[in-house]
Image (cartoon, rainbow, N blue to C red):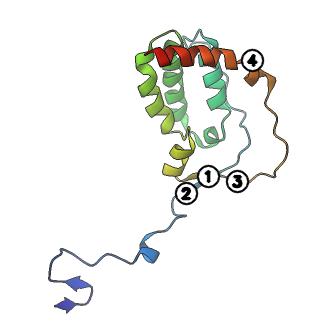
């Protein structure tokens, strides 16, 4: 028996809407500029000693995502940077916690897709890798080897 949108057989409540109506791909989407942000300097009171943790702060503080951050997000970055410092000091048990925290900011392509976060298209051109990034590769290899040993 059918009474309007209500079905009396085999289900509760109204029939679901059609997919074309239900799925709005652009609803709640966040589009960010791909440009680096001015960010904030690393707080002097933050107990961070490793170059990797300082680079972590700089990367996230200048990321396009930080343009929309509130004070609570910056506090979360401070806490996570301390955890990253401990990771670089050898506490590999923190890797999972750090991964969960940075996923909420959109660290990977998958995270950004889940968060419906996208970046404005920028014109194609030659992309150069800054020298400071190339210099940090050796440190990242050392951390990778430590994590791989676990």
Nearest to the observer: residue 66 or residue 102: 102
Residue ID for mark 4: 135
Q: Is residue 100 left or right of residue 50?
A: left
Mark 4 surroundings: few (<14), some (14-19) or many (≥20) residues within 10 A = few
Which badge, 4 or 3, comes first in the chain's sequence?
3
Q: CA distance from mark 1 to mark 4?
A: 29 Å
In the image, what residue occupies the spot 48% across and 10% down?
Answer: 90
Residue 34 in the image: state x and y as whole percent: 71, 45
Indicate which disc, 2 or 1, sits on the residue closer to the N terminus.
2
Of 30 and 91, nearer the camera is 91
Position of residue 60 in the picture relative to residue 86 (left or right)? right
Marks 2 and 1 close (CB-CB < 8 Å): yes
Please give the label number shown on residue 118. Answer: 1
84 left or right of 120 in image: left
Chain-order first, disc 3 or disc 2: 2
Q: Residue at horizontal 53%, vertical 28%?
A: 77
Q: Nearer the viewer, residue 44 or 106?
A: 106
Q: The N terminus lies in which quarter of the figure?
A: bottom left
- Please tell me whether mark 4 or mark 3 is closer to you in this view: 4
Chain-order first, disc 1 or disc 4: 1
Kindly state the secondary structure of the residue where label 3 is placed.
loop
Tags 3 and 1 touching, CB below 8 Å: yes
| Quarter that holds the C terminus | top left
């Amino acid at each position: 028996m059918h009474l309007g949108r209500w079905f009396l057989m085999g289900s509760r409540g109204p029939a679901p809407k059609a997919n074309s109506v239900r799925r709005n791909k652009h609803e709640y989407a966040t589009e960010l500029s791909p440009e680096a942000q001015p960010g904030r300097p690393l707080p002097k009171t933050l107990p961070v000693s490793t170059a990797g943790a300082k680079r972590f702060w700089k990367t996230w503080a200048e990321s396009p995502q930080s343009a929309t951050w509130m004070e609570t997000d910056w506090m979360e970055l401070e806490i996570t940077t301390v955890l990253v410092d401990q990771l670089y000091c050898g506490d590999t048990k923190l890797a999972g916690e750090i991964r969960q925290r940075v996923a909420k900011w959109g660290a990977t392509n998958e995270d950004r897709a889940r968060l419906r976060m996208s970046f404005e298209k920028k014109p194609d051109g030659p992309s150069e890798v800054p020298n400071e990034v190339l210099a940090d590769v050796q440190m990242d290899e050392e951390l990778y080897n430590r994590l791989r040993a676990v």
